[in-house]
Amino acid sequence: MIIVSTRRVLTPIKYTAFALQHRVVDYAVIALRFKTGLAFFCRRMDELKEMLPGPRSLIEKLQQDGFALVRGLVNLHEVNNLSQAIAPQATASRSAGVRGLAGKVPAVGLLAQTHNIRQPVDMILDPSARLVRSILFRKDAQVNWHVNWHQDVTIAVDGTTEDPQYSAWSTKERVTHVQPPLSVLQRMLTVRIHLDVTDEDNGALCVIPGSHRMGRIAASEVATVAKNAEQTICRAQPGDALLFHPLLVHASHKASSDRPRRIIHLEYCDAPLAQGLSWVDTA
Ligand SMILES: O=C(O)CCC(=O)C(=O)O
């Protein structure tokens, strides 16, 4: 027998005795408790997914927003080791970035191939994906800078091709740069490992969620797109990794504090380049 909400007619004690005696189940109360519990559970799951996205949610978040923060991808012991390993490069350079970092600092080359980093990369790209760019970006008391809103549409290569899909050739620091076809950019993933607490005060990366879905945006239009869209500041803790799509519109403001902000920036790609071209990780 099922009796729903008998509490109106029975006192709580009588109700309990009655319920025990007749095995009455107040389905309305149970359903309500279940609904509240489920809502709480779902909210917690959303929060947890945000902190450490599981495989599905990581892929969904990257597809939807073009970026995802993975908390504690590198442990603090390793962050400390990396900080020491990059220190000579960081102090020798007065510029915003130390390029070709994996070639200069063996610990970074190893980091780029560790299971922790490869796991999310292999979830998004084909396991044949290779590291194609590695940079140390630093802001601190000596070096402060900003970059305007942009997409990462240029790659560093060796060689040349007649393929008309490759355009806007240039040479930076004696390295050939070119804009590849969308088919290459769509198969790239950037992983940024934070070595410091990063926030708006020390120039955290700002992104426009979902902007990667607009495809390649004319350089003259990017600022307007950003001005009219919701912006997200990518705050992070040491060891957190920001994964993002190269077409995600992003910018970086000058730091207003002296707190260092060091990031190991790694780019992976699983697409072949046109014949005659090869990747060069000195960019
Ligand atoms: O590290 C930053 O703040 C900016 C980096 C950037 O703009 C880029 O990787 O294209």
Image (tube, grey):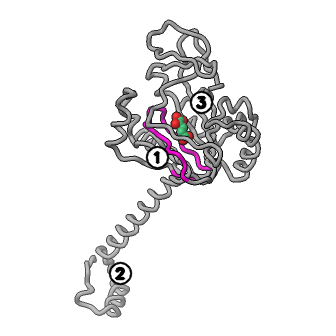
Residue shown at 66% from the left, 34% from the top = 98
Image quadrant assignment for residue 111 = top right
Query: Residue 23 bears which disc, if any?
Result: 2
Q: Whole-percent x and y of residue 266?
A: 61, 35
Using the numbered discs, state the Cα–Cα distance from disc 1 to disc 3 in whole angstroms: 19 Å
Between circles 2 and 1, the one closer to the viewer is 1
Crowding at dot 2, Cα within 10 Å, few <14 / some 14-19 / many 20+, comes out as few
Type of the residue with mark 2 = Arg
Q: Whole-percent x and y of residue 162?
A: 50, 6
Type of the residue with mark 3 = Pro
Q: Earlier in the sequence, mark 1 or mark 3?
A: 1
Crowding at dot 3, Cα within 10 Å, few <14 / some 14-19 / many 20+, comes out as few
Helix, strand or loop at mark 3? loop
User: Mark 1 highlights which residue?
Assistant: 57
Residue shown at 60% from the left, 11% from the top = 159
75 left or right of 165 in image: right
Q: Whole-percent x and y of residue 89?
A: 73, 37
